[in-house]
Amino acid sequence: PAGSGPVVLIDEGHHMTSQVLNAVKTLINQTRALFVIAAQETIWRKLQASSWQEAKQLVLNRMRERVRLGAPTGDDVASYLQRRTGVWISEAVGRKIAAEAGKWGDFAALRRLAELMLELPTDDRGDQSALECLASVKDMLA
């Protein structure tokens, strides 16, 4: 039954090789563990193309569910920055940052944004400084 065994989390699953895919299939077949594989969708598709036979058995025969996570929303941005920097930003700025973060690495861009904001004096952190720091993040990543 679901929930009665251990959970195995595999991050960066898009970097697996055909041999690792085969090992995961074997573990799925021989254990009661629930496997969660986190992978970037575009790179996962390349893995499926290069190791189609192995990936097909895993994805088509053994997968219970696929969950796709999208880019952060404006609320995600506001919540993340509040937790990391202690500053609430406006909903409008959150939406602007979310739209840009999707182009520059999603939460990785937000992490860099928060790091830059933390370098500012507490009183200088807010909507305007968040947008200025975002411009710096884009310059760093360009």
Image: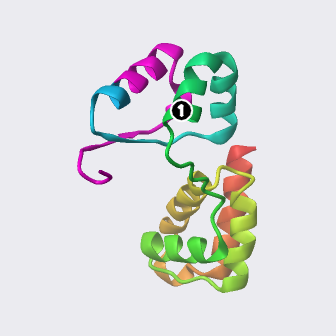
- Residue at 61 percent of width and 53 percent of height: 68
Residue extending farthest to the front is: 1
Front residue of 115 and 46: 46
Amino acid at dot 1: Asn
**Mark 1 sits on what residue?**
61
Front residue of 62 and 79: 62
Q: Could you tell whether 111 is left or right of 97 in the image?
A: left
Residue 47 falls in which quadrant of the image?
A: top right
Q: Secondary structure at mark 1?
A: helix
Decide: few, some or many residues near mark 1? Use Cα within 10 Å; few <14, some 14-19, many ≥20. Answer: few
Colour basis: rainbow
Q: Magenta stretch: residue 12 in it?
A: yes
- Position of the C terminus, as image quadrant, is top right
Front residue of 58 and 92: 58
At which x and y percent is residue 10? 41, 37
Q: Could you tell whether 99 is left or right of 124 in the image?
A: right
Tell me: residue 60, above or below residue 51: below
At which x and y percent is residue 46? 69, 26
What span is colored magenta in the figure? 1-26
At which x and y percent is residue 11? 44, 39
Residue 69 falls in which quadrant of the image?
A: bottom right
Tell me: residue 99, above or below residue 109: below
At which x and y percent is residue 1? 29, 51
Tell me: residue 14, above or below residue 124: above
Tell me: residue 104, above or below residue 22: below
- Residue at 72 percent of width and 75 percent of height: 95
Front residue of 126 and 103: 103
